[in-house]
Image (cartoon, rainbow, N blue to C red):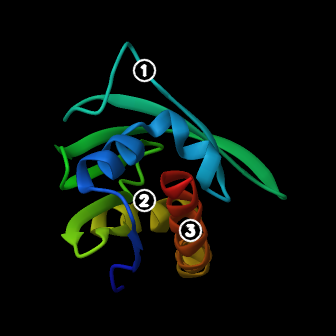
Amino acid sequence: MDNPCQSASIVINRPPAEVYDMVADVTRMGEWSPVCTACWWDEGGGPRVGAMFTGRNEVPERTWETRSEVVVADPGREIAWAVAEPPTRARWSYLLTAVEGGTELTETWELPPEGAAFFEQMFGDDAPKQIGLRSEAAKNGIPATLAAIKKAAEA
């Protein structure tokens, strides 16, 4: 099974350091994401490698929470985390590139082999469908999230 990946970019009229400060503050994700309604740092964490946070997600069919671990925290350049619980290890990242007029912000969702293995164990023959649903949700949600971050950053 291929490792699904979805990604999109947007240019924001703010410097990379300012955009980084916004997206690295996961407590603001609920303002922008169409699925993630809230996030909070666990045990006094913050945007540093190894920090853990919990996110609440909602779609019409269900509500669930995940715990994620920050795996990259490079101020002004990239913030990334991997979902640790349940052990899907889906990876979300925000890559920042200085461009004329501000920052190109690229959001990426990917499901590495261990994530696909989790879905196969959890859903059996239905795993490809379940992975496809999540990939499609990322494909649709990423542009909406980026547009909302841009709107907030440029307000």
Q: Identify residue type, mark 1.
A: Asp
Residue type highlighted by circle 2: Phe
Q: Residue 122 or 38: which is nearer the viewer?
A: 38
Amino acid carrying label 3: it is Ala
Horizontal and vertical percent position of residue 7: 40, 77
Residue at image location 52% in from the left, 70% down from the top: 142
Nearer mark to the viewer, of 1 and 3? 3
Give left or right: position of 77 versus 107.
left
Element marked by disc 2: helix
Q: Which residue is mark 2?
A: 118
Place of residue 118 in the rendered image (x, y in percent of width and height, measured from the top left):
42, 59
Cα–Cα gap, marks 1 and 3: 27 Å
Residue at image position (35%, 51%) is 19
Residue 133 location in percent, x, y? Answer: 62, 76
Front label number (2 vs 3): 3
Q: CA distance from mark 2 to mark 3?
A: 31 Å
Relative horizontal placement of residue 33, taking residue 62 as reference (left or right): left
Q: Residue furthest top?
A: 43
Q: Nearer the viewer, residue 104 or 89?
A: 104
Label 2, residues with CA under 10 Å away: few <14, some 14-19, many ≥20: some
- Is residue 110 in view? no
Looking at the picture, how far across and down is residue 104, in whole percent?
A: 31, 71
Please tell me whether mark 1 or mark 2 is closer to you in this view. 1
Q: Residue at x 23, y 76 (%)?
A: 100
Does residue 135 sit above or below 81 in this rendering? Answer: below
Q: Label 1, on which residue?
A: 42
For the point 25% across and 62% down, which residue is it? 96
Asked if residue 3 can be seen in this view, the reply is yes
**SS under mark 1:** loop
Contact flag, marks 2 and 3 (Cβ < 8 Å): no
Question: Mark number for residue 147?
Answer: 3
